[in-house]
Image (spheres, grey):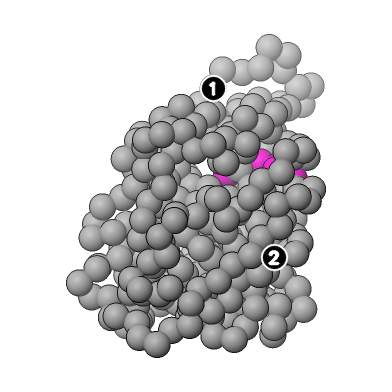
């Protein structure tokens, strides 16, 4: 999921490495080679394990990391939780960009609200949403359910505006972020998500960014049934800060095989790079739940 913005900016400016751990496909060299070719960095199909993240981001080795496998039999039923409520703005300018490891739609907190459920009285705002996927259908979600992976996972990243002044500040606090996770399965084309997918050919390379003209309703990305699991966890990309209240919807939503195939065509390198590789998958394997409290709000609303 979510990315610390400071780290993200550093990466976009070329001061931080591409996230290791994702499976990449080597593509042919561009016809016109740059004058000063970059050294070859990765071999075909090489997989750099997320376990290497701990070398630069020690928190990635913590006890409260995400994603996890949801053992449905181990989840405690949540009682007396207030309803989980959200409100999003449809008509405002959004940008969609390729940070080198996914596609991401930036909302920047514009007129939105998420509260209730496990979030108590605090009000969270939507900062950005992005997606994880796999090299083939049937894998790609970050969370798994009773050991079963899904074909992808959307993350809607919110920050706590009741306690903190900015996304950056909240991202470092244990109650700073709340992420809605939506499992994706292959089926019908998702019309709302297609407003994003149609733009992906315009952000093929790392650093590419376009403005979305069409109104998008983030609420339409969520399943109709409000039943979810929740637990305290972390960002699933470096720096893997343990600042996330995870809310994973039980009901998957459908996307088409073509939509997933279009996502896999994004590349992790810049257009000028000697080697541009497709992002075949970009999910982190599950980590132990440990002693954390996993709750089941089947009748949350
Ligand atoms: Zn994510």
Instruction: Give the dominant element type of the magenta stretch: helix, strand or loop.
Output: loop
Look at the image and tell me in which quarter the C terminus lies. bottom left
- How far across and how far down the image is residue 274, in percent? 66, 25
> x, y (%) of residue 220?
55, 50
Would you say residue 74 is visible in this rendering? Answer: yes
Between 117 and 242, which is closer to the camera in this rendering?
Answer: 117
Looking at the image, tell me whether mark 2 or mark 1 is earlier in sequence order.
Answer: 1
- Residue 112 circle label: 2
Left or right of 230? Residue 13 is right
Residue 194 position by quadrant: top right
Q: Are there few (<14), some (14-19), or many (20+) residues within 10 Å of tag 1?
A: few
Foreground: disc 2 or disc 1: 2
Element type at mark 2: loop
| Residue 213 disc label | none
Q: Is residue 56 above or below residue 188?
A: below
CB of mark 2 near ligand 1 (< 8 Å): no
Q: Is residue 197 above or below residue 121?
A: above
Residue 90: image x %, image y %? 70, 52
**Residue 275 rendering spot, x and y as whole percentages:** 61, 27
Q: Residue furthest top?
A: 31
Residue extent of the magenta highlight: 95-102
Please name the residue that numbered disc 1 is placed on.
27
- Please name the residue shown 69% across and 85% down the image: 163
Left or right of 46 on screen, residue 4? right
| Residue 100 in view of the camera | no
Please tell me which residue lies in front, 58 or 125. 125
- For the residues marked 2 and 1, what is the alpha-carbon distance in whole angstroms? 40 Å
Label 1: element kind: loop
């Amino acid at each position: 999921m979510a990315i610390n913005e400071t780290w993200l900016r550093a990466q976009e400016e070329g001061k931080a490495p591409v996230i290791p751990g994702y499976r990449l496909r080597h593509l042919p060299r561009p016809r016109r080679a740059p004058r000063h070719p970059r050294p070859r960095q990765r071999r075909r199909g090489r997989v750099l394990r997320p376990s290497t993240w701990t070398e630069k981001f020690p928190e990635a080795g913590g006890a409260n990391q995400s994603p996890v496998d949801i053992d449905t039999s181990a989840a405690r039923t949540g009682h007396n939780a207030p309803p989980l409520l959200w409100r999003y703005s449809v008509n405002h300018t959004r940008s969609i960009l390729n940070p080198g490891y996914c596609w991401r739609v930036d909302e920047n907190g514009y007129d939105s609200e998420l509260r209730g459920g496990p979030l108590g009285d605090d009000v969270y705002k939507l900062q950005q949403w992005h997606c994880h996927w796999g090299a083939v259908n049937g894998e790609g979600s970050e969370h798994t359910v009773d050991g079963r992976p899904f074909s992808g996972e959307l993350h809607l990243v919110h920050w706590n505006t009741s306690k903190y002044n900015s996304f950056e500040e909240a991202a470092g606090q244990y109650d700073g972020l709340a992420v809605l996770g939506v499992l994706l399965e292959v089926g019908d084309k998702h019309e709302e998500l297609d407003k994003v997918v149609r733009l992906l050919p315009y952000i093929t390379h790392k650093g590419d960014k376009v403005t979305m003209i069409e109104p998008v309703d983030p609420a339409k990305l969520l399943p109709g049934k409000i039943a979810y699991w929740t637990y305290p966890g972390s960002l699933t990309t470096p720096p893997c800060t343990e600042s996330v209240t995870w809310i994973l919807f039980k009901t998957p939503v459908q996307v088409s095989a073509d939509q997933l195939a279009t996502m896999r065509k994004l590349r992790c390198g810049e257009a000028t790079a000697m080697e541009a590789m497709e992002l075949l998958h970009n999910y982190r394997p599950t980590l132990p739940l440990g002693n954390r409290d996993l709750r089941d709000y089947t009748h949350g609303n």
